[in-house]
Amino acid sequence: MSAWTIPEWRAAASRARYPWDPTHTLLEQLTADDPAWITLVDEAHFRRQCEALHNIIRQPGIHRLPLLGVPFAVKDNIDVAGLPTTAACPEFARVPDEDAFVVKRLRAAGALVVGKTNLDQFATGLSGTRSPFGVVPNTFDPMRICGGSSSGSASVVARGLVPFALGTDTAGSGRVPAGLNNIIGLKPTRGLLSTHGVVPACRTLDCISVFSLTVADAMEVTSICAAPDGGDPYSRPAPARSGTEAHPHDCLLVPADPDLEAGSPEHHAWEQALEMFAAQGIRVHAADLSVLDEVAALLYEGPWLAERDAAIGGFIDSAPDAVHPVVRDIILEGRRFSATDAFRARHRLAELSARAAALLAGHDALLVPTVPLHPRIDEMLADPVRLNARLGRYSNFVNLLDWSAIAVPGPRRSDGLPFGLTLIGDTWNDNRLCALARTWLDGLTPTLGATGRAYNPLPPGELDEDDTTSAAEAAEPAHITLAVVGAHLRGMPLNHQLLERSARFLEATRTAPRYRLHALSGTKPPKPGLSRAEAGAAIDVELWSLGVAEFGSFVAAIPPPLGIGSIELDDGRWVKGFICEGHALEHASDITPHGGWKAYLEHCSRQGLKP
């Protein structure tokens, strides 16, 4: 199962007796002494996940889960219910009762958590060397840095232990380790993925990132995680159109001075990449990018450090010796800035943003080296601040500008080490960047991470014809059919709760003739209650299709006395639908003879009655 992609894991799950069996086999092979892991899931926790998954797939109306049986890892500053969240600081550790929003959506889609991964403490650093749980080595050369702060997540993906892992990205933590380990690092537009349940670094800049072996896998995971979240004030939905065209201009902006040592392996790989893009028919336009350096300087030389202090400073005051000294010094530096400094920096950022936007205009994307150098671990430890700043040369400015980015493998360096490229675009250009990345990789055909496997194609004999069909079928999005009977009907005041979850209207139909409908008292807006009864009638309902993750969030918002149960339709089908607790019907008006909620409201309107 080394270096399986998501479709291959799905295929394995579809062939197994139980869909979680392949992941259980994987767990037996993982070892706690691997510095990429902080916590591995134990047997009891895994069994609870399997029980939860079983409860999902046995529900009526469930078709296929897009990530059924697929294992994944989670950076240890992102909550997983029942597992410690340490942010790489043992004294800070707590055990959350609830999954982070993105973890919840992935598990609702059938994915299985196998462990929490190591990181630069409090996600402060780009090297992977600032953790009391150990330094995570590079997957190609153990003497060199893995990159951070999402070092463990990048490592377990690059080695093919899991097909994808979650990271975070404030200054490049979701891109730098991807570039240094020959994998994909997708950093979506800020707010597309909720950060609810994430230990904050800079809350206004923090992003969830996705590490994977292929662009297709990163896109699928992101699409499953993406949804508005009322628990995150910075969450925002993508617009209807978000840059789906691959090459509207056929031109990439590149740095005139790429900050690569002349004659170095990095420089040769960069020149080779530019030649390969030209061979694909994509022009490159070199320009002075010093405005981006000015933006980047605001992050670690300006008052955004104070935002890190706002997040972690209180803990540092209570337990200063628990914090890595480099991390502690960086965060406490934020205390020298005033509110006046913060506003001046915001004004300066607005000026620089306008200049940067003008520079990017007319180009498909900005193309840069993911990092300009690849230090050894001993070099990084000897000079942690200066080298970290150099590692972030092409990543620190992205979130400040509200841009999107994807790190991809580039041509291999002459010494055999990876050389990463990053495609950077404007806000909500995520899809366009992914299309560019796939076009690039189709021409490059690199290996998958550090596994030696070829990019994208399935190996001969890995899946036979029947298995491939199973994998394709398993990839279909999972949906639940929901019957609505009252305020969620089309044209009713709560129908927006379905539409904002991308629900799709299927049909208008009726229940089996075994239900009664009541007008509940004191509900705002007015709502009916449906109950099953021997002396019943057929009631008008509408059927809507909801993604399984969206269904979960929809159900969570339903107030008592209403709930969701199984409803029989007049054609014999059973679907999920609204039901009402019996005690609420005692003082409710029986409106069954009207045959449905809309008919009852029309009756009230004609009679001048209040429903």
Image: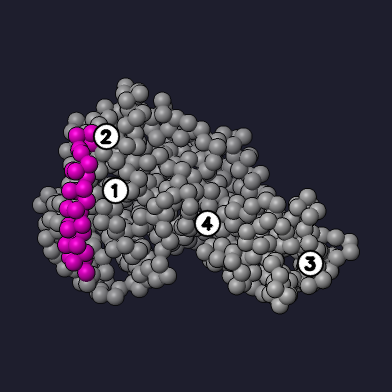
Type of the residue with mark 4: Glu
Between disc 1 and disc 2, the foreground one is 2
- The reply to whether callout 2 and callout 3 are in contact (CB within 8 Å) is no
- Name the element at disc 3: loop
**Which residue is tagged 2?**
331
**Could you say whether the residue bearing mark 4 is in a helix, strand or loop?**
helix
Q: Which residue is mark 1?
A: 172
For disc 3, the marked residue is: 591
Query: Do the numbered discs 3 and 1 sit on residues whose CB atoms are within 8 Å?
Result: no
Residue 13: give x, y in percent of width and height: 60, 53
| Amino acid type shown at disc 1 | Gly
Q: Residue at x 17, y 65 (%)?
A: 359
- What amino acid does circle 3 point to? Ile
The CA span between labels 4 and 3 is 53 Å
Nearest to the observer: residue 129 or residue 27: 129
* Crowding at mark 1 (Cα within 10 Å: few <14, some 14-19, many 20+): many
Q: Which residue is mark 4?
A: 8
Magenta stretch, residue numbers? 334-361
Task: Give the residue type at disc 2.
Answer: Ile
- Residue at the far right in the pictured view: 535
Question: Looking at the image, which residue is at 61% across and 43% down?
Answer: 49
Distance from the alpha carbon under mark 1 to that under mark 2: 17 Å
Q: CA distance from mark 2 to mark 4?
A: 43 Å
Binning the other alpha carbons within 10 Å of mark 3 as few (below 14), some (14 to 19) or many (20 upward) gives some
